[in-house]
Image (cartoon, grey):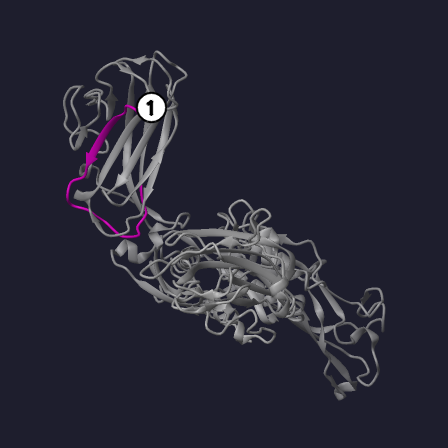
Amino acid sequence: MQTADAVVRLQPIAGRWETCGVDRLRGVSAEGIRLDANSWGPDTASFTLKRDPGALWPDLLAFTPVEIEIGGVLVWDGFISQTPTTDSDGGSINIQCKGWQYHLDDDSFEKVWVDSMFSSWKAPSDFQGTTVNYYRPNVTAEVSGGAITLGWGKGIEARQNTYAGVIYDAGPEATISAISTSWTAQKGDGFASSANMVVYAKASNTVAGLINGTDALFTGATPGVAMGAIGTTTSTGGTFSTPGRYVLLGMKFIGTTNTVANNFMIKVLSVSVTGDSAYYNNTSKKITGPSGEQVVTDALTRAPLINGSPDIRTASPAFNIPNFSSTDGGQTPREYINRANAYYDFIAKVNPGRSFVFKPKPSAPSVAVGRWGGSRFEDASANSADEIYNKVVIEGTGPDGTSMRVARYASGIAGLTAARQTVDQTLFNGDFTQPNGSSGVQPTRWAAANPSAATFLRTAASTAEFKLIDGAPWTTGAANSSNYTATGTLASGFTFKKGVNYTLTFTSTTTCPGLPNLVMQPYCRFGTSSDAATVAAASQEGLSNNITVSWSPTADAPSSTVTIQLLFDLYPIDSGVFNNNDYLTIDDMTIAYSSPTMPDRRGFTRTKRLQVESMVNSAVAVQLGDNYLKAHAQTPLKGSISIDGRGARDYLSGATIHPSQLLLEVGERIHLSHRIDPDTGAQGRDGDIAGVSYEHDSQSAQVSIDSQRNRFENFLARLAVLTSVRTQR
């Protein structure tokens, strides 16, 4: 068995690092070392020191930093959490430690990255410091029915310089630096617009100070923005010259006091605020929420002891969280990171060396075990179908309070490992072999239709390709003034399923001998008359291009309703005359679709419904749904592996890995070379390392394989707790 020595180091307050058994009480070394790691990194550690339990040991005080090396490799670090003692056998001290991940729970703070919830806005009467001098009780200032309604109803007295408004409270630790909003001037019987009704957004650190706050929506030298003509929508935003805890969004009456003869009302369609003006775009007047890596970076500023070089990655494609804030007592750095990670499902942990890692889960394993021995696997999920889904429905509430429901399908997710199935070529004659015969024959299921009577012909009886040929000389004019189109109609016998990702691919070659540098524009439209995907790809004369267009139907579509339309257009437009030698050659056309799950391959749908209690819009629903399906597309590998000194190997090099170093691999993938993958039938299975426990006396590790398959449900539950509606003040 491969053996390795353990070194335990402690750092007293304002002191240098000391090695147990060397720098203090030489020969009294740590015994019974046990180390644990979970998905957040080093978790707990324990060891025993045979020291006088009644003495004061400066190196064993609470929060003393601890580092543990096995075989010269730092595999665990953290701090002392408690030191229970015993007088038995001459006395000893049991050292209990926690990993640096628990430093993420020490502090809490309030911050508004972006808040887009209507429910965060309250009537002025809910706050102390407002008076009827500015907020009259008979004006309309409501947050209900999925909207904010502000204004004066017909017959209500409108006093000069009073507001119909709502107030936002960022909490005592946060301030708001920018706002983005849109509203509609309501129309209907008795509704009207007035130049005396002006919309303001003001910030202050006190409620009373809002009246004199600087307006963020000003245009030029004029404060505020007109309510707009009835039925029109205004979108605007701005930054506050002096950020404040409170924000007033309100319509102000600037005319002479009178009883209004019409209804002057606006309906606020959206409103977002942020505490960081970097999230505000002055051109679009919109606020973009933070990315996951931005939340992690901000949260780590409140955990200063995690000070190693961080490894914080960016999601691809990028995703910005549209609603992310805490204003009621604050949250810890771990809570913020955990909440942001619900949208990412990244690895988020503190590595030994106090370095924080935020990165995508790996697709390839880093560790392997197999028939060479040294490992014993207990499979808790052989061929389990319980957690496999190919459809998820996300149900939640939008920022305006209305219900939202979005469905996502595993076969429609880009990048999800999937088996590809090809639609029968005879349905659309994609290889252009029908009918057989000489060149110049129009292929079956294809027809030409264009202003210059172009033909759509087989190039030769022996080749599976066709030419879209211009039928008469063509003199160019304005852009897209003339083009050549062919449409392929599919036969019955196949149904394009809702949500499934269908990919049409073909090769395209432009031929125009007279203009060798000409760039043409082949277009392709794939789908039904009301639901289709399109692609356009520039094609230089003489060069072959691979063109792909992907279509996910929004409803089941029989193949007889689906068409493939090709269009040949000059791009960019050049002057000149083109003759019958100019043509577009198409070849090797196929339609394929993904079957990433067993239900897909068996031809049925298995649906999971996710209830999301936090704010949901379409982007959030897609992100959450896709993450869930990626985690539940295949038969889960769950269980545990006991590994001794020779059982684990580096996946790429085959070099033996000491069991203690598996503590560093939590979150990575492990390959079981002696198992069969039930999804593909291939030799070998991969699983996620969810936790590791290492016993130094036996030089062995117990590895938990994906024992947290419900982690995504836990993320959503945690997200609901952390983003609950704020209490009224």
Q: In this view, does 563 lie to the left or right of 233?
A: left
240 or 568: nearer the viewer: 240
Q: In this view, does 344 lie to the left or right of 608?
A: right
Q: Can residue 591 be seen in this view?
A: yes
Q: Which residue is drawn at 76% across and 86% down?
A: 89
Q: Can residue 351 be seen in this view?
A: no
Secondary structure of the residue carrying numbered label 1: strand
Instruction: Please give the count of numbered marks on the rendered protein.
Output: 1
Q: Residue at x 27, y 25 (%)?
A: 483
Q: Is residue 677 left or right of residue 96?
A: left
Residue 706: % across, % down:
48, 64
Most extreme residue toward the bottom is 87
In which quadrant is the C terminus drawn? bottom right
Crowd band around label 1 with a 10 angstrom C-alpha radius: few (<14), some (14–19), many (20+): many
**Residue 515 higher or lower than 46, as above or below:** above
Magenta segment: 479-503
506 or 202: nearer the viewer: 202
Q: Name the residue under label 1.
A: 509
**Residue 523 higher or lower than 79, as above or below:** above
Residue 338: % across, % down:
55, 64
282 or 584: nearer the viewer: 282
In which quadrant is the N terminus drawn? bottom right
The quarter of the displayed image where residue 307 is located: bottom right
Residue 411: % across, % down:
33, 51
Q: In this view, does 169 lie to the left or right of 579?
A: right
Q: Please, what is the dominant secondary structure of the magenta stretch?
A: loop
The quarter of the displayed image where residue 486 is located: top left
In magenta stretch: residue 490:
yes
- The three-letter code of the residue at mark 1 reads Thr
Residue 245: % across, % down:
62, 66
In magenta stretch: residue 35:
no
